[in-house]
Amino acid sequence: MNTPVIAEAISEAMGKSFRVESTQSVGGGCINEAFRLVGSDASYFVKINRATWLDMFIAEAEGLNALRQTDALKAPQPICYGVDASQAYLVLEHLPLRSLSSAAQTILGKQLAQLHRTTSDQFGWQRDNTIGSTPQVNTRMDEWSQFYAEHRLGYQFDLAAQQGLKIPDAAELCDSIETFFTDYHPKPSLLHGDLWGGNAAMDDAGNPVIFDPACYFGDRESDIAFTEMFGGFSSAFYQAYQSEWPLNAGYQQRKDLYNLYHVLNHYNLFGGGYGMQAQGMVVSLLHNIGKSRK
C-alpha cells in the first residue's frame, strides 16, 4: 500500500493536510485487505485490492452514499477512492465498532424498516455492483419476479454451471418464480443487499452502523431473509422491524427463495457444501410450488 499517495488523496478530499503517523492492519474480510491510517487528529479506514477492482470500490461508495442520503440509519462516509500502480483503494471514515447491544438491535430494526420505505418506480439500481466479489446485475425492470429470475437466481445458476454445478431443475424454478407472488406485489425498496451479522455493528455511542452494502431496489423481504441465514440478529431486531412495518404473511414461503441467491453466491465464491445445499433448496421450493397448485 502506497501510504503517501493515499494520504495525499485524503488531504485533497478533506480540504486539509493529512499525514499518516501509523498504519494498523484490520482483519475481518476475505475479499480485500484493510488498514487503519492514523494521523494526529484523524484516522481513516482503507480497503485495497487489485487495480482492476476499482469499479467494485466505486459501487460500494455509491451504495454507502445512497444509504446515508436516506437519513434512516448510519453508514460510514466514503472519503475517496482511486488507483495507484497495481492497487485500487477505497477510503472511508473510521468508526470504532463493536457488537450490537440489545438496545441497538431494536433501533436497527426500526431504522431498517425506515430505509425500506425509500422506494423507486423500478427494481434494480443506477449501476451494477457486486455481492461479495461476484458481479451483481442491476438492470432496471418493472416486474420483480422477472428481475429476480433473470438478474439474481438465473445469473447465479449460470455461474454455478460454469463451475460444474448443474442443477437440473434450475430453469423450472426460474420459470415458476411468479407463483410466489400471486397475492403479493412488493414495491421496489432500497436494500442494503448483503445484510448479514458481519455487516452490522454499533459505534461507541450505541448507534447501529451498517456497511459493505450491495444496494439496489428490490423486495424488502430479501434483506430480512438474509439476516436469518447466518444469525447475528436478535428477536428484538425482528420485533422492532415488524412493529414499524409488518411483513406480508407469505414471507416464510419466500424466505428460502431469497436465501437461495446467497447460497448459490457462496458456492460460486467458495465451493464446497453450498452446492448441495442449493440443490436441496431448489427441490424444496419446487415441491412447495407443487403443493400450492393443488
Image (cartoon, rainbow, N blue to C red):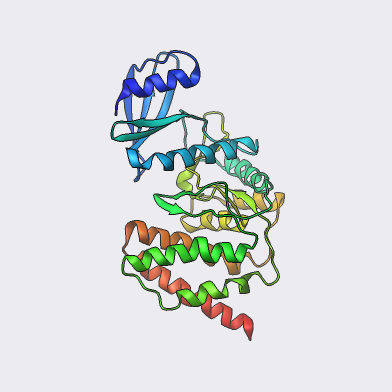
Relative to residue 177, is residue 233 depicted above or below? above
What is the quadrant of residue 42 in the picture?
A: top left
| Residue 281 rendering spot, x and y as whole percentages | 46, 71
Would residue 79 be seen by someone viewing this image from the given angle?
A: yes
Q: Measured from the top left, where is residue 35 in percent x and y?
A: 35, 31
Q: Residue at x 43, y 74 (%)?
A: 280
Residue 74 percent across, percent down from the top left: 58, 35
Q: Is residue 100 left or right of residue 219?
A: left
**The N terminus lies in which quarter of the figure?**
top left
View extreme (bottom): residue: 294
* Residue at image point 47% right, 36% down: 98
Q: Position of residue 52 (x, y in %)?
A: 34, 42
Residue 259 appears in the picture as rendered: no
Q: Is residue 29 above or below residue 175?
A: above
Residue displayed at 38% across by 63% down: 159
Q: Quick one: 146 or 111, which is closer to the camera?
A: 146
Where the C terminus falls, by quadrant? Answer: bottom right
Count of numbered tags: 0
Q: Is residue 114 above or below residue 272?
A: above
Q: Quadrant of residue 254?
A: bottom right
Q: Residue at x 47, y 77 (%)?
A: 283
